[in-house]
Image (cartoon, rainbow, N blue to C red):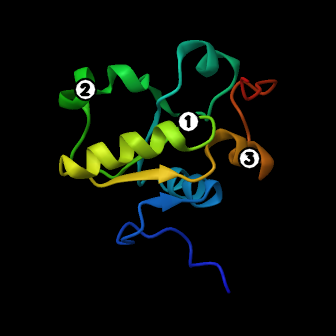
Amino acid sequence: MGRRKPASLTDVDSDYTPNEVAELLSRDEVDLIDVREPDEYEAGRIARARHIPLAQLPEEVADLNRERPIVFYCRSGSRSAMATDAFRDAGFDAHNMAGGLLEWEAEGLPLDPADGRVAA
């Protein structure tokens, strides 16, 4: 079974791999939202991600751009999957980063800061 082509904004699947997210970010085609807790975010994150803890997302909806696809991520992909489902139901073009920051790091993609880590 082959991998699907690089991320396309017309994909119906709501999950992207970390490599697909990195590609979309490099082309500035998505807004990336980190839904982890503040201590997790401070330990290590993806550069250019906006930090909005999961519990605060409802308060921030009005500040999110409905005209751009949004990718949510967390440590493993569970919390971000919940955010993705809720935002898709609300009419956003929302996607989850499968495997979360654990998978991002496993793929050798960079964390910010350079000595960042995935919080336990």
Q: Position of residue 21 (x, y in %)?
A: 55, 54
Residue 67 visible from this viewpoint:
no
Check disc 1 and give the amino acid type: Cys
Local crowd size for mark 2, using a 10 Å CA cut-off: few (<14), some (14–19), many (≥20): few
Check disc 3 and give the amino acid type: Leu
Say how many tags the image has: 3
Which residue in the protein does label 2 denote?
58
Local crowd size for mark 1, using a 10 Å CA cut-off: few (<14), some (14–19), many (≥20): many
Check disc 2 and give the amino acid type: Pro
Q: Which structural element holds mark 3? A: loop
Q: Which structural element holds mark 1? A: loop
How far apart in space, not on screen, are marks 3 and 2 (Cα)? 30 Å
Assess whether mark 1 and mark 3 are in contact (beta carbons under 8 angstroms).
no
Front label number (3 vs 2): 2
Q: Residue at x 60, y 33 (%)?
A: 47
Q: Residue at x 37, y 21 (%)?
A: 55
Front label number (3 vs 1): 1
Residue extending farthest top? 39
Q: Earlier in the sequence, mark 3 or mark 1?
A: 1
Q: Which structural element holds mark 2? A: helix
Q: Which mark is residue 36?
A: none
Residue extending farthest bottom? 1
Q: Residue at x 73, y 29 (%)?
A: 118
Residue 118 is left or right of residue 87, and the answer is right
How far apart in space, not on screen, are marks 1 and 2 (Cα)? 17 Å
Which residue in the protein does label 1 denote?
74
Q: Residue at x 76, y 43 (%)?
A: 105
Which residue in the protein does label 3 denote?
109
* Quarter where residue 77 is shown: top right
Q: Position of residue 2 (x, y in %)?
A: 67, 85
How far apart in space, not on screen, are marks 3 and 1 (Cα)? 15 Å
